[in-house]
Image: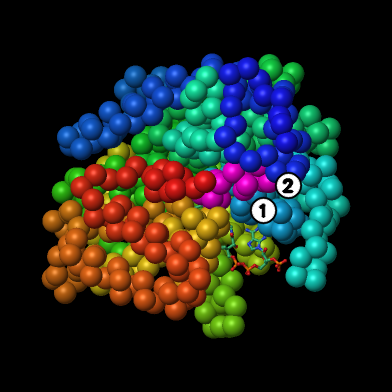
Amino acid sequence: MALNLPAGMQINAPIHPGFEDILTHDALALVAKLHRTFEARRQVLLRARVKRQQELDAGKLPDFLPETAHVRDGDWKIAPIPEALKCRRVEITGPVECKMIINALNSGADSYMTDFEDSNTPNWMNQIQGHINLKQAIRRTLTLESGGKSYKLNDKVAVLQVRPRGWHLDEKHVTVDGQRVSGGIFDFALFLFHNAREQLARGAGPYFYLPKMESHLEARLWNDVFILAQNEVGLPQGTIKATVLVETILAAFEMDEILYELRDHSAGLNAGRWDYIFSCIKKFRVNTDFCLANRGAITMTVPFMRNYALLLLKTCHKRNAPAIGGMSALIPIKNDAEANDKAMAGIRSDKTRDATDGYDGGWVAHPGLVATAMEEFVKVLGDRPNQIDKQRPDVNVTAADLMDFQPEQPITEAGVRNNISVGIQYLGSWLAGNGCVPIFNLMEDAATAEISRSQVWQWIRSPKGKLDDGRKVTKEMVKEFIPQEMEKIKGLVGEAAYNATYVRAAEIFEEMSTSETFTEFLTLPLYEQLD
Ligand SMILES: CC(=O)SCCNC(=O)CCNC(=O)[C@H](O)C(C)(C)COP(=O)(O)OP(=O)(O)OC[C@H]1O[C@@H](n2cnc3c(N)ncnc32)[C@H](O)[C@@H]1OP(=O)(O)O
Ligand SMILES: O=CC(=O)O
Ligand SMILES: [Mg+2]
């Protein structure tokens, strides 16, 4: 099928039936306009990340920025939140897949964040079919016949929010003037162009979640993208609302500034715990003082995570902004009632802590968790939609508190093996087109897998990377464990899947975890492997 492309744009990918409804001339013209206006700035900001890493590697620790003290000290609030985003006690998330979209919108959660990022493999099919699904879902025409079941949307559905890809990812199939376009701008522009007016007519609006930012200047770029896009599409300024995931250690030092940059478009902040842990490992990877224990020991109650969560809450409510909690990786466990009860108790205590701290809502991974999470928020909120009025003057978090990186032990052989197995299994699934999977009864996505593979890299290099029995974690140890774990993985996933993507996944995992240079995001080399 031939598309009518804007001048200077090329698409190097198949145009399957239905894709022409998304890849329209005018929608792509918005992509091209945003690209030409903002691509140079995106590249400058990505280079600034590299420079910042060099400073961190040289031992310069992050701190609150002196040049923006006036923003932190100023008395300002974000613009009023639209009615549709006032009540966000439970937000379910999931990839932009047809059945998941219907189930999530019908789940009873207040809101549903549909995901082009952590839980999605951004292959061409997933991306464009995802947009087709969303366009139909918003118009209430999305249906599915699958496994003998008929799926359709309820009359009352969750409020939709969309997470485009982060600034680091390109959309390699689409070029403008010979350059790849930003994945985030591509996802954002296509969604906005096709759906904003329809959403407004139905009482909500174009609402987004912004991932993986490392500075307020990156938030400023999104804000400028919003301003131009609103003008181009003919929407009043301030129509778009976006919640920023504070999921990098550097962004934690700039929460006020991020809210300030987006103040006309802000819908608050979310504590993206998994990428946050990954970011800490990544940013301090060569710091010989830094070394975290087994992944399972890094919970929301360890000092640096607790301090970050409380600072996020305090910062949001001071600015009249919603504070949304992140996601526990616990999911319902089939065929093991005792393990399932334990998982549900874990979900309950995660949401109890967030709600009693003052959070306005929190994320869940699965429809089976919505009711439990809702109960815990309703216990605290009663019939109030949120608790933004709850201020936390008692919370005082310093730079040192944000970097109180404990615990450092235990690191165990089981912990190393678990990281290897989970990392390879996730990569194998991602390459096969599924970016979110249950592994060993936990939700695994790009953010959780990043922790697994970066811990292995860091334990090899850190003098503190020693097992509880005294053995040092080494490249040789990891190279010895990988084939052993692969044998078990073959049994778990079956021969065909194993040969299709898991063998390649293991090669990439080994390279990534044992090479001298650290891969910034596991999705960067993986994306180049996709057709
Ligand atoms: C770090 C972060 O970024 S967190 C945000 C990103 N992560 C996510 O969004 C998690 C999304 N969750 C999921 O993908 C899945 O729940 C998984 C992979 C964790 C578990 O998947 P499974 O074990 O296959 O789920 P399970 O078999 O129990 O699913 C039961 C039903 O619930 C549905 N379901 C499960 N999770 C979701 C979801 N998040 N949204 C909508 N429906 C869902 C399934 O489609 C299935 O529907 P069906 O009964 O109609 O067939
Ligand atoms: O995106 C969420 C996270 O925890 O990472
Ligand atoms: Mg994340």
For the image, the number of numbered tags is 2
Binning the other alpha carbons within 10 Å of mark 1 as few (below 14), some (14 to 19) or many (20 upward) gives: many
Badge 1 marks a residue whose secondary structure is loop
Q: Earlier in the sequence, mark 2 or mark 1?
A: 1
**C-alpha gap between disc 2 and disc 1:** 7 Å
2 and 1 marks in contact (CB < 8 Å): yes
Q: Is residue 85 magenta?
A: no
How was this image coloured?
rainbow
Binning the other alpha carbons within 10 Å of mark 2 as few (below 14), some (14 to 19) or many (20 upward) gives: many
Q: Which residue occupies the foreground of this view, 461 or 406?
A: 461
Residue 69: x %, y % from top left:
37, 22
Q: Which residue is mark 1?
A: 97
Instruction: Look at the image and tell me whether residue 105 can be seen.
Output: yes
The amino acid type, in three-letter code, at marker 1 is Glu
Which residue: 47% across, 74% down?
495
- Residue 262 sits in quarter: top right
Badge 2 marks a residue whose secondary structure is helix
The amino acid type, in three-letter code, at marker 2 is Asn
Q: Which residue is mark 2?
A: 133
Q: In this rendering, would 342 be left or right of 487?
A: right
Q: In this rendering, would 414 be left or right of 107?
A: left
Q: Which residues are magenta?
A: 118-130
